Image (spheres, rainbow, N blue to C red):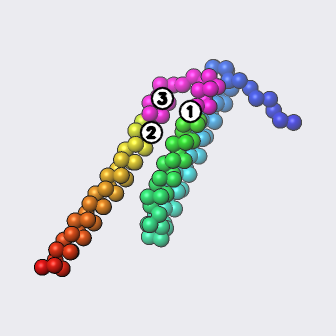
């Protein structure tokens, strides 16, 4: 038989269980990130062409999970600590910064390839 779902009461036993659950989720996620980073370093030369797609896929998955978890907790009426809200928005800023960096690097790379192609064409014509 499935145990009944209990509603969290601030300061009650469920609050302790919820805090412990959040710590375990954080430890699991951080451990997976470290493992993935180590694995990436181990096979870097073999998957270098997949760097940007993997970064984008990871960022999108993380963003969706972060948004959905935040929405579920809000819908359940769970109280949110100020530091949790700060980390939530800080994470969005970091994701935006990573996206902007990727876009700028791609644009700069495209511009440098164009300049190189023009220089090569000019050298051939002279």
Residue 76, quarter of the rendered image: top right
Q: Dot 3: few (<14), some (14–19), or many (≥20) neighbours within 10 Å?
A: few
Element on which disc 1 rests: helix
| Callout 1 touching callout 2 (CB < 8 Å) | no
Q: Which residues are magenta?
A: 71-89
Q: Residue shown at 48%/29% (left/top)?
A: 85
Q: Which residue is mark 3?
A: 85
Residue 22 location, x and y as percent? Answer: 59, 35
Residue 29 location, x and y as percent? Answer: 56, 46
Q: Give the answer, above or below, for where 22 lies relative to 52.
A: above
Residue 80, quarter of the rendered image: top right
Q: Dot 1: few (<14), some (14–19), or many (≥20) neighbours within 10 Å?
A: some
Q: Earlier in the sequence, mark 1 or mark 2?
A: 1
Q: Nearer the viewer, residue 11 or 49?
A: 49
Element on which disc 3 rests: helix
Tag shown at residue 91: 2
**Residue 69 colored magenta?**
no
Query: As drawn, is 12 to the left or to the right of 98?
Result: right
């Amino acid at each position: 038989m499935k145990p009944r779902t209990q509603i969290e009461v601030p300061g009650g036993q469920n609050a302790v269980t919820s805090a412990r659950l959040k710590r375990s989720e954080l430890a699991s996620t951080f451990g997976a990130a470290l493992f993935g980073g180590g694995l990436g370093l181990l096979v870097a030369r073999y998957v270098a062409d997949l760097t940007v797609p993997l970064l984008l896929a990871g960022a999108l998955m993380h963003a969706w999970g972060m948004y959905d978890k935040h929405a579920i907790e809000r819908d359940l009426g769970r109280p949110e600590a100020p530091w949790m809200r700060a980390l939530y928005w800080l994470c969005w800023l970091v994701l935006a910064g990573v996206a902007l960096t990727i876009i700028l690097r791609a644009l700069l790379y495209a511009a440098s390839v164009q300049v190189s192609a023009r220089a090569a064409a000019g050298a051939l014509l002279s």
